Image (cartoon, rainbow, N blue to C red):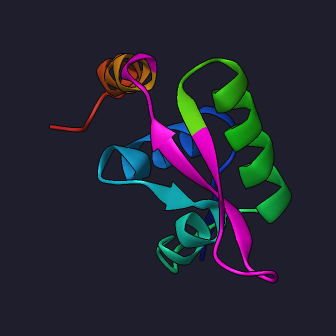
Amino acid sequence: MTIELKGSALEYYVLASLSMGDLYGAQILQKIPSYLTVNQADLYEVLTKLETEGKITKTFVQKNDFTRYNVCSITPNGREYLKTLLKKIKLPR
């Protein structure tokens, strides 16, 4: 059984991943555990939303004529939002 990440859960996953270091979209997808699924379109929609809200930044990188990607980084605003999301999570005791 797999669980599909969407909405706030996907935002949390992305921000938590970026809090450990800069990544590009494909790297975020590669790091998803096998028991979770993420629709690629949903991921890029969340990345755009987080960038628009100032929670992440994207830096365009071009390695050669064929390899281009945006490296995503969490901002201080994104770290604060991540803390807010963590406070909302109620873990079982």
Q: Position of residue 12 (x, y in %)?
A: 48, 38
Name of the residue lying farthest toward the right: 41
The quadrant in which the N terminus is found is: bottom right
**Residue occupying the point 73% across, 29% down:** 49
Chain part drawn in magenta:
58-77
**Residue occupying the point 36% across, 20% down:** 76
Magenta span contains residue 59: yes
Residue 89 relative to residue 11: left or right = left
Q: Is residue 65 above or below residue 38?
A: below
Magenta span contains residue 55: no
Name of the residue lying farthest toward the front: 65
Residue 78 relative to residue 86: left or right = right
**Residue occupying the point 62% across, 42% down:** 58
Q: Quadrant of residue 50?
A: top right
Residue 82 relative to residue 14: left or right = left
Q: Position of residue 67 (x, y in %)?
A: 73, 79
The quadrant in which the C terminus is found is: top left
The number of numbered discs placed on residues in the rendered structure image is 0
Q: Quadrant of residue 62?
A: bottom right
**Residue occupying the point 30% across, 19% down:** 87
Name of the residue lying farthest toward the left: 93
Q: Position of residue 56 (x, y in %)?
A: 54, 33
